[in-house]
Image (spheres, rainbow, N blue to C red):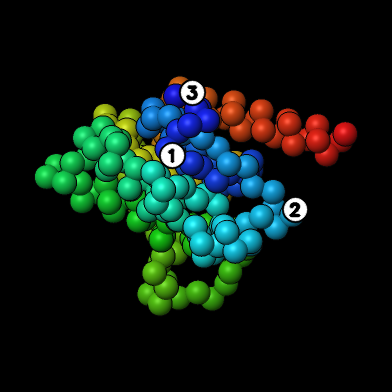
Amino acid sequence: MPRADDADIVLYYKPRTRAFRALWFLEELGRPYRIQLMDFGKGAHKQPEFLKLNPMGKLPTVVDQGTPIAETGAILLHLADKYASGQLAPRLDDPKRPDYLRWLFFAVGVMEPAFGEKFFKWEDIPPNRVAWGSFAEMERVVTEGVTAGPYLLGEQFTAADVLVGSNLHWGVLWKLFPEKGAVADYVARCAARPGLKRAMEIEERYVKAQEERAGG
C-alpha cells in the first residue's frame, strides 16, 4: 500500500532494525501508513517525547489513530485484529485462533531468547529453569510447525508468519538453522510474498539515502 503523508497509522522506523518486521506487516495489511524516521545518532529514541510512546526507547513503535503501541507482538496483534480480522488474524471464534496466538507469543518469548542463547554461546542454562527451554527444543518445535506449510496455519498467512518468518530469515542468514530443509523452504515462501518484497525495496531506499547522507 503506498505510504501517505496524512495516514493515521505512523511507524517509527530506522533501517536495519526490528522495525522492519512492522514495515513488512504494514505492507501486508494494505492500509495507508506513514513513516517517521528516527535518528539514533542524535538520540531521538531516548528523548522524552518518544519515551512517552515507548518507555523502552525501542523500535518498532506505532501510533494508530493517536494511540501508541509498543512491542512488535502487540503491534501486530492489535493492527491485525482491528483492520484484518479473518485475514491476517483468525477471528476470535475461529478454532485456529489459539494456535495463532501461540505462535505470536512463541516468536517473541521463546525464539528470540533462544537465538541469544545460541548466538552469544550462553552456557550452563538449565532448560527447565528458563521460559524458552533451549535452542534445540525451540528448533524442533518451529521446524515441525513450518513443515506442513505453506504457512503456520496452513493456507492462511497471518501476522504470526511475519514474526516467525522474520526470526527464521535471520536464523538461516546467521547459520543458526540449516540452509536447506523445512525452515529454509518456509523462509523462501515468505520471501516470495509481494508484501515482503515491497518492504525490502522501501528498506533499501532508506539505507541508500542514509549512506548518501553519510558520504556527503
| Residue drawn at (11%, 45%) of the image | 93
The residue carrying mark 3 is 2
- SS for callout 1: strand
Whether residue 152 is visible:
no
Residue 33, image x, y percentages: 46, 33
Residue 16, percent from left and from top: 64, 43
Marked residue nearer the N-terminal end (1 or 2): 1
Query: Which class describes the residues within 10 Å of circle 1: few (<14), some (14-19), or many (20+)?
Result: many
With respect to residue 185, does 60 lie above or below?
below
Name the side, left or right, on which 175 lies relative to 110.
right
Counting other residues with Cα less than 10 Å from the Cα at mark 3, is it few (<14), some (14-19), or many (20 or more)? few
**Alpha carbon separation for disc pair 3 and 1:** 13 Å
Please report whichever mark, 3 or 1, sits nearer to the chain's N-terminal start. Answer: 3
Element carrying mark 2: helix
Q: Is residue 114 left or right of residue 151?
A: right
Q: Residue at x 29, y 36 (%)?
A: 83
The N terminus is located in which quarter?
Answer: top left
Query: Residue sitting at 45 percent across and 47 percent down?
Result: 63
- The residue indicated by pointer 2 is 41
Q: Mark 2 or mark 3, which has the lower sequence index?
A: 3
Kind of residue sitting beneath label 2: Gly
Q: As rendered, which of 50 and 206 lies closer to the eye? A: 50
Q: Tag 3: residue type?
A: Pro
Q: Is residue 10 above or below residue 110?
A: above
Q: Which residue is mark 1?
A: 9
**Mark 1 is on which residue type?**
Ile
